[in-house]
Image (cartoon, helix red, strand yellow):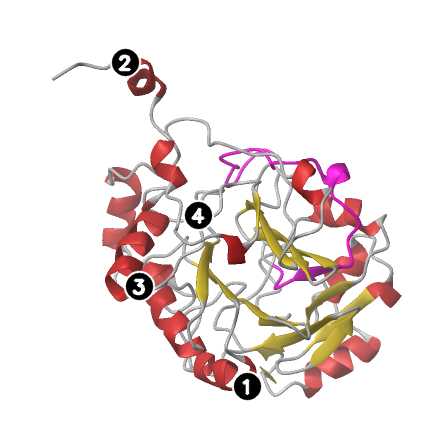
Amino acid sequence: MSLSGLRLERVRASRQFADGRFRNTAPVGPGLQGNPLPLLGEYFFGGAQRTPPAPLPLESPLDAWARKADSGFRVTWLGHSTMLLELDGARILTDPVWGERASPMSFAGPKRFHPAPVPLEALPKLDAVLVSHDHYDHLCRATITALAKLRVPFITALGVGAHLESYGVAPELITELDWWEETRVGPVGFTAAPSQHFSGRGLGDRNETLWASWVLTTDKRRVFFSGDTGLTSEFEEIGRRHGPFDLVMLEVGAFHPSWGGIHLGPENALKAHAMLGGGRLMPVHWGTFNLALHAWDEPAETLLRLASEQNVRLFTPRLGSAVEPAHVELATPWWREVAPVELAMRPATGG
């Protein structure tokens, strides 16, 4: 991918861009930390259940989508980092991935644990699509090509618009933001905020586009979406500038100490949550693809335990369920219902 014209000018003007590449504020890169040999052993011989033992339960949001949200704010988790946010009259779709694999290839790469809860064509009318960065589990070419036909505005980070344009999105519908820049679509303000990650979709385009976390605001509420990130002190600045938040959506999956600088995991998600100023916490970026070495449900299970110890309120909607955070008091550990078929069919024994 090559950048040109005004897009290239804006990329070169970014404080995060130097020597032809974007960089994190802290000297953190995407490479593995430490000796890779134990990691290989964990990959080949680890005993974690990395994929669900049975089909995941999915709900349909279609009936709920046909009605207005009583509170004005409703969230539908469609898997991984894909959410439909109904925010004071606007509908925003985040990091839309309907593809079968998070991969440049249709026959190889991480495969979905579950189908999308609804087909793309069943989505209600969208006001904006938000793409946090260009990795395959956040930017799916086939999905973008389909959404491009709807002529909906796209909000993304610097440089990523070149991908969107090549996938069929009209250039006039693309807004690319540097960190701390803002734009507005209807009642919703979008601010690109710092994150600690990296970018690239091939061997030769590492860090040519920017990655970002995102603040969404209306006159009534504020929402934070992490995209992909490691733990960074910049969360404190985000909290000072834009908090407190009604909902904080943080990535908790695909983590490992060997790449602990570029993904949060449950423990660091709670640290980031505190730095941002608290608020209801929704774990995302888990439960759809096997992108790490941990058990498929470990991010949610660990977060539930730690959040209980720290008195943090969690919001864990089921896949496909359209839920208003204001109407939910307790987390729902729905993943515990997923049991192997043979166990589920085993007759109960009395005691």
Q: Which residue is mark 1?
A: 241
Helix, strand or loop under label 4: loop
State how far apart marks 1 and 2 are (Cα): 54 Å
Q: Is residue 335 left or right of residue 170?
A: left
How far from the left and from the top, in percent, is residue 72?
66, 59
Q: Which residues are magenta?
A: 107-134
Residue ID at (66%, 52%): 69
Judge the density around disc 3: few (<14), some (14-19), many (≥20) Cα neighbours within 10 Å: some
Question: In this rendering, which labeled residue sits more in front, label 4 or label 3?
Answer: 3
State how far apart marks 4 and 3 are (Cα): 18 Å
Q: Earlier in the sequence, mark 3 or mark 1?
A: 1
Q: Could you tell me how many numbered marks the image carries? A: 4
- Badge 4 vs badge 2, beta-carbon distance below 8 Å: no
Asked where in the image residue 276 lies, by quadrant, the reply is bottom left
Quadrant location of the N terminus?
bottom right
Quadrant location of the C terminus?
top left
The amino acid beneath tag 2 is Arg
Q: Earlier in the sequence, mark 3 or mark 2?
A: 3
Q: Which mark is residue 289?
A: none
State how far apart marks 1 and 4 are (Cα): 33 Å
Q: Which residue is mark 4?
A: 291
State how far apart marks 4 and 2 are (Cα): 31 Å
Q: Which residue is mark 2?
A: 346
Q: Which residue is mark 3?
A: 267
The amino acid beneath tag 4 is Leu
State how far apart marks 3 and 1 are (Cα): 24 Å
